[in-house]
Amino acid sequence: MEFAHLFSKGTIGNMELKNRVILPAMGTKMNAPGGYVSERLIDYHVARAKGGNGLNTVEVTTIHPTAASDDAPALYDDKFIPGMTQLAQAIRDAGGKSCLQLWHGGKVTPNLIQVSSSPVPFEGVTHIPRELEHHEVSEMVQAYADAASRAKKAGFDSVEFHAGHGYLPQQFLSPAMNFRQDEYGGSWENRCRFPLACIRAIREAVGSEFPILMRISAIEDLPGGLTLEDMKLFSKHAEEAGIDAINVSRGVPSGAAIKYEVPPIDLPVGFNVDNAAQIKSAVNIPVIAVGRINDPAVADRIIAEGLADFVAIGRAQLADPEFCNKALAGRADTIVKCVGCDQGCFDGFVNPKVPFISCVFNPATGRESEYELQRTSTPKKVLIAGGGPAGLEAAVTLKRRGHSPILCEKNDILGGQLYIAGAAPRKEEMAAAALNMGEAAKREGVEIRMNTEVTPELIQEISPDEVILAIGSTPIIPPVEGVLNSHVVNSHAVLWGTAHPEGRVVIIGGGLVGLEVAELLVERGNQITVVEMQDDVANDLGILRKICVMESLYGHGVKLMTNSKCMAIQKDSVMVEKDGELHSLPADYVVIAVGSRALNKQTLQDFLEESAIPYHVIGDAVQARRALNAIWEGAELARRI
Ligand SMILES: Cc1cc2nc3c(=O)[nH]c(=O)nc-3n(C[C@H](O)[C@H](O)[C@H](O)COP(=O)(O)O)c2cc1C
Ligand code: SF4
C-alpha cells in the first residue's frame, strides 16, 4: 500500500485512530452567534471526517466567559452541551473520531477586558490586559476542567489543552510574559504551576481513561521567551501530569512570530518537523508534527522516519477534504493542494468583513451544503473564453454538473495570472496549483482549445447556449512622461520572463506584484528601488505573507519610497516627487507595476447581445482582483447555469 506508514493505525492514550492524520484545530467563524454550534460547522467537520482522517479537532473553544467571542464556539456553560453533542455525534456518524480544543486566549481575545498572568500587552498592542487575581487563577483552572467534563459528556473522544500560540497557559509559562510575584510567577517551577494545575484538573475531571492532547509552541520566538529546551522540559512535566500526546506547533501572535502559527507559502514544507522530533526525544507519549505538511508523501516520510507519531494536516484538508481518501486510493495526484497562500483561510479569519473561512481552491469549504453539486436537468453547451483560474473553475464545475463546457485559451499555457504569480520567489507551488487546475479540467473531460482566441466568428461556429467571458486583465500603463521608452517594461513581462531588467531598477508601484518583481530582481543581483504613492507598501497582501515579503526585501536591501509619485521617466533616471520635493533616481530600467485593468471585451459583448446569446463576465475580466475572487466567481456562476 502506498503511504503505508501514514495510513497505519495509531493510538493516543486509549483512543485508537485509523491512521496518523489529524485535522488540527482551525478557527472557522462558522459557529452560531453566542458560541453555539451551527449546521455549517457540523457540515464542515463531517466533510473532513468522511474524507478519511484519523481525528477531527474542533477549533479553539472558550472555557470561560472572559474569553468568549462571537467568532469561537464555547463550552463554558452547560447550555452549550446539546450543540456540542450534535457535533460529536455527526463526526462519529461520518466515521471519524473527535477532539475538542480547550482554549482561553488570555490577552489574545477580542474582548474589551482581557486577562493575563501580568498586565503586559503583546508588542504593538496598546490595550493593557488585567492581571488575574490569585483566586481567579484557581477559577481558570476549574474552568478548563469543567469544559473538559462537558466535552466528554457531549460525546467527544478526546480534548486538547491549548498551551501554545501565546494563549493563557503560555502567558503563565513564559518568562517574557509572566512578571507575577506570587507562586504563579518568577521561577520555572512557579511559571509551570498554572498550566500543570490545568492539566491535573482536566485529568481529574475526565478520568484516567480519557485521552488528553496538548498543543504547544515549540519555540516562543519572543525576546527572552521560551526555548525549545524549555518546551522539552515542560513536555516531560505535562506527560507526568497526565497528557497523552503533544501537538507541536510554533509561534505567538506578536510581531513576525505569528508567521509560524499559520505558515505561508514563504516557509518551507514541513518547516517545523525537526522541532516535533526534538520534543519527541524528550517524552514517551505520541508527538504530532504540524506546519505546511501538504503532501501525503511528505507526511508518510515524517512517520516512516520516526520524526513524529502523527501529522496534523490543517489547510491541506481545507483545500481538499478528501485528502486522505484520495491518497489511500492511489489518487494522490488528484488532491487539490494547499499552497499556503492564506487568502481564503487565515486572511478570512482575521478580516471582520468575511463571515467564515474558506479556501481559494475549494470555495465549498464552509459551504458544504449550499455548494453540493446538483446535476443539471438541462445540459448546455457553454463556451468559456479564458483559461485562467476563473474560467477553469467554471469549466470543471459545469462539466461535473453535466454541462458541456468548451474552454478556449489564447495562450499556450493554462492558469492565467495565477501561473504568472508563481514566477515570484518562493511561489513555485502557486504555479503548480495553476497547472493542476488545468490538469483537473482535462481529467474531467472538459474540451480545451489552446492558442485559441474567442472571436465573434468562433462563437458563430461553436453556437453555444451560453458564453462565459473570463478573459482576464492587462497591466495598466500610467500616463507618465517617458513611459513608452525602451528601458521601461511592465511587471507581467518580467514575471513571464520576456523582459530582463538589469542594474539599477526603479519599480513604480509597491503592491504585491511590484514587491514580488523587486524580490525576483534583487535576488538576481540588481539594485532595486520601489516607488509607492500610498503611505505603505503591500496594502493588497495578507499579514502573514506581508511579514515574509518585507523580511525578504529588507534582508536584500531593497529601497522602499512611500508617499512618492513618479513624475517622469528619463533616459537614465526617474523623477519622483516626495513631500513636495523632486528627487532624481538613477535607473537603467524601469518596471511599471501599478496594477491591472480588465481586458476590453466590448466587441464580444456587442456580438453576444446582437446574437441574443446569454453571457456572463467573471474574474479579472470584471475587475482585476485576487485569485480568490476569480475562482469563487467561477464556482458560483457554474452552479447557477
Ligand atoms: C484559519 C485558521 C485558524 C486557525 N485556528 C487555530 C485554532 O483554533 N487553534 C489552533 O491551535 N491552531 C489554529 N490554527 C493553526 C492550525 O491548527 C495549524 O497549526 C496551522 O494551520 C499549520 O498547519 P497547516 O500548515 O497544516 O495548515 C489555525 C489556522 C488557520 C489557517
Ligand atoms: S486559502 Fe490558500 S492557504 Fe488557505 S487552505 Fe486554501 S490554498 Fe491553503
Image: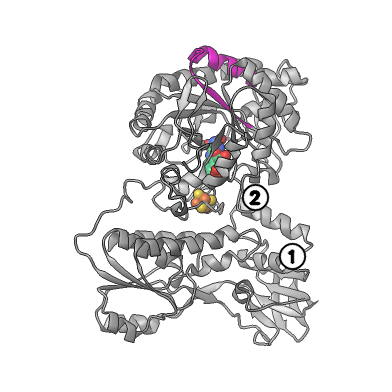
Instruction: Please say if 322 is above or below 343.
Output: above
Is 243 in front, or is 547? 243
Label for residue 611? none
Q: Residue at x 78, y 38 (%)?
A: 223
Percent position (x, y) of residue 73?
A: 45, 33
526 left or right of 596 in image:
right
204 left or right of 495 in image:
left
Which element type, helix, strand or loop, lies under badge 2? loop
Which element type, helix, strand or loop, lies under badge 1? helix
Percent position (x, y) of residue 193?
A: 68, 17
Percent position (x, y) of residue 117?
A: 67, 25
Label for residue 523? 1
Category of crowding for the residue at label 1, using alpha-carbon neighbours closer than 10 angstroms: few (below 14), some (14–19), many (at least 20): some
Q: What is the image's colouring?
A: one colour
Q: Residue at x 44, y 23 (%)?
A: 151
Residue 208 in view of the camera? yes
Percent position (x, y) of residue 401?
A: 28, 59
Residue 198 is a magenta residue: yes
List the residue tagged with mark 2: 268
Q: Would the CB of label 2 be found within 8 Å of ligand 1?
A: no
Tag 2 and tag 1, C-beta contact below 8 Å: no
| The residue stretch that appears in magenta | 195-216
